[in-house]
Image (cartoon, rainbow, N blue to C red):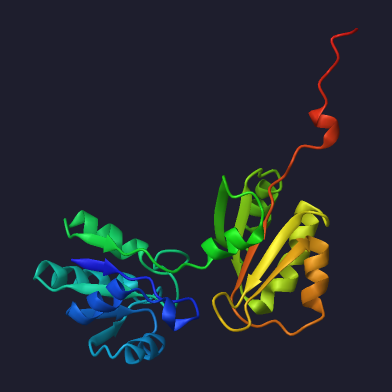
Amino acid sequence: MLYIIPTPIGNLADMTFRAVTILKEVDVILAEDTRTSGVLLKHYDIQKSMFPYHQHNEHKITERVIQDLLAGKTMALLTDAGTPGISDPAFFIVRECIKNDIKVECLPGATAFVPALVNSGLPINRFCFEGFLPLKKGRHTLLTSLSTETRTMVFYESPVRLLKTLLQFMEYFGNDRPCCVSRELSKKFEENKHGTLKEVHAHFAAKTIKGEIVIVIEGKTKEKNELRVESDED
């Protein structure tokens, strides 16, 4: 069978006991980056064979992985941080396992957007997860469609693109749209900056930006004049 193992998004202490136990028991570990996963495995004294499995080779090696699983091997899939499949490789191999009647089990664990969403203080009864925006093709179309989205929206972004993305959000959603930008979640210098898009942009424009970024933006709300109930009097 194949285990999908969430790994800490920053603080190594966030690894679950069950995840450590399974990693010690499986035959093989598939890792998005063997160097990054190697640090985690060394921390928990896990000595297992690791093979790279990432977006650049998954289509090439998945068939071989499936054959090994069918032959009786037990494997675990790790990505650099968080839950595999959430803006990281996993979908393709999980789909192929299901096609071949191979059992897949995803453990609960760390993922960046959940603490960012809760920390935002924005409505979370309904939300949409957009992950990373397209870099070029499709970006305008997606942002245009999201300009009328009423649910809270969650995005991932890199520190080098944060300011540009916030400027685009201001263009499509308006300067005063409430938002929260979270970075370095679970780490020593964790920051959750609340405010309007304009205020948050100004905050990060004045400092050096480091760490992985989660942006949470309130959905479009009806204007006051749209909420007025028409009078029965003509």
Whether residue 195 is visible to the viewer of this picture, yes or no, is yes
Q: Residue at the location (48% across, 81% down)?
A: 11
| 131 relative position to 31: left or right | right
Q: Is residue 80 above or below residue 124?
A: below
Q: Quadrant of the N terminus?
A: bottom left
Q: Position of residue 17 (x, y in %)?
A: 30, 75
Q: Which quadrant of the figure has residue 200? A: bottom right
Total labels drawn: 0
In the picture as drawn, the residue positioned furthest to the left comes out as: 71
Which sits in the foreground, 91 or 150? 150
Q: Is residue 122 above or below residue 45?
A: above
Q: Residue at the location (47% across, 67% down)?
A: 111
In the picture as drawn, the residue positioned furthest to the top comes out as: 234
Which sits in the foreground, 209 or 88? 209
Which sits in the foreground, 16 or 211? 16
Q: Quadrant of the C terminus?
A: top right
Q: Is residue 222 above or below residue 92?
A: above
Q: Position of residue 181 (x, y in %)?
A: 68, 67
Q: Position of residue 210 (x, y in %)?
A: 65, 83
| 131 relative position to 63: left or right | right
Q: Which quadrant of the figure has residue 223? A: top right
Q: Residue at the location (81% across, 21% down)?
A: 229
Whether residue 133 is visible to the viewer of this picture, yes or no, is no
Q: Position of residue 103 (x, y in %)?
A: 19, 59
| 177 relative position to 58: left or right | right
| 69 relative position to 184: left or right | left
Q: Residue at the location (48% across, 66% down)?
A: 87
Q: Is residue 130 above or below residue 88?
A: above
In the picture as drawn, the residue positioned furthest to the right comes out as: 234
